Image: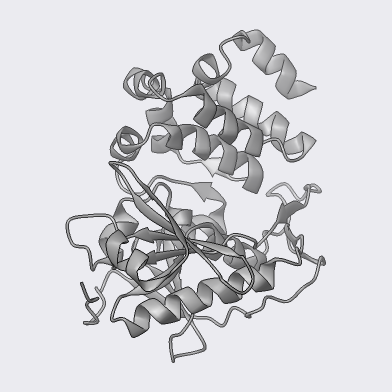
Amino acid sequence: RSSSTGKRSSSTQVVPLHLKIPPTRTNSPCGRYVHTPDPREPINLQSALQVVKKLRRRGHEALFAGGWVRDQLLLLRGGGASPTGEPIDAVPVTLLDVDVATSASDEEVLSCFPHTSHFTDSRIRTVVVVDDNTGASTEVTCFRGPDPHSAAQDASRRDFTCNAMFYDPVAQQGGGLVLDYTNGGGQSDLSGGLLRCVGRPWDRFEEDPCRMVRGVRLAAQLGFEVEEKTMAAMRSDECVAWLRGVSRERTFIEVCKGSGTCHQWARTLDLLEVSGLGNVVLPELSDKEQREAAEV
């Protein structure tokens, strides 16, 4: 299947932006967010770039997606001080994982690269491509939605607006393009420090209930507030019932990711208690114990 290269939708915000490849290696703060460099970052980034270029040569759309794009934008825009002017904790950000989204099918991705691992379920189809020279791994996920060529439809099925943006690293204009198919919602929410579901929160959480715990973890890690409708869905009986069907292993992994610093861990516990998800994720702790743990 080849990608469609027609005119982009009028609801797409295209921002010319050059994101350095390799990224600038510095641990100096940029506003609130601080880049914690890892020597593997340039290697992983170059490997992901080669994956994009090879898929493009085969006629497929291929873009950087998800957390790498989000965190690059956070580092560029910083976050400033808190609304009250009080000091805020620096938020460490790494740029280690560079994921690729593509219009190619998983079979077509497998045919392009000799060394891969293949994962698929009812929601996503992902191929992990291993660089023969460096051993770096790049996750390549097929676009979701009825139109396999549509990055916009894939964005509409991602979890949160801040994760629904793409970066075209080989665009000719301005050295690269950030693509926001949420009508600018991704960039707006990123600037405002708001965690918001893409579209209707109940739909996103029904697709994967573990997204609720991931939302708690992201809000805690990035210092975001959870948007009102997103929080209302998390607290609803319907969504809580869906979460009970998720394995403890998956929710445990998300909770552990939210414990990188003492502040993040306290915020994770606080959000789990406020949302009511703690009763499912940490059933051993009462509401009172969760509140007390968050205050330590």
Quarter of the N terminus within the rendering: bottom left
In this rendering, does residue 145 appear at all?
yes
Where on the picture, by quarter, is residue 288?
A: top right
Compared to 4, does 244 lie above or below? Answer: above
At 78% from the left and 34% from the top, the residue drawn is 262
In the image, 226 versus 18, the foreground residue is: 18
Image-based side of 125 in relation to 252, left or right: left
In this rendering, does residue 168 appear at all?
no
In the image, 159 versus 57, the foreground residue is: 57
Where on the picture, by quarter, is residue 172?
A: bottom left
Q: Residue furthest front?
A: 114
Where on the picture, by quarter, is residue 100?
A: bottom left
Spot occupied by residue 124 in the image (x, y as percentages of width and height): 33, 49
Quarter of the C terminus within the rendering: top right
Compared to 243, does 47 lie above or below? Answer: below
Spot occupied by residue 34 in the image (x, y as percentages of width and height): 75, 60
Image-based side of 286 in relation to 161, left or right: right
Compared to 48, does 193 lie above or below? Answer: above
At 51% from the left and 22% from the top, the residue drawn is 248
Spot occupied by residue 126 in the image (x, y as percentages of width and height): 39, 54
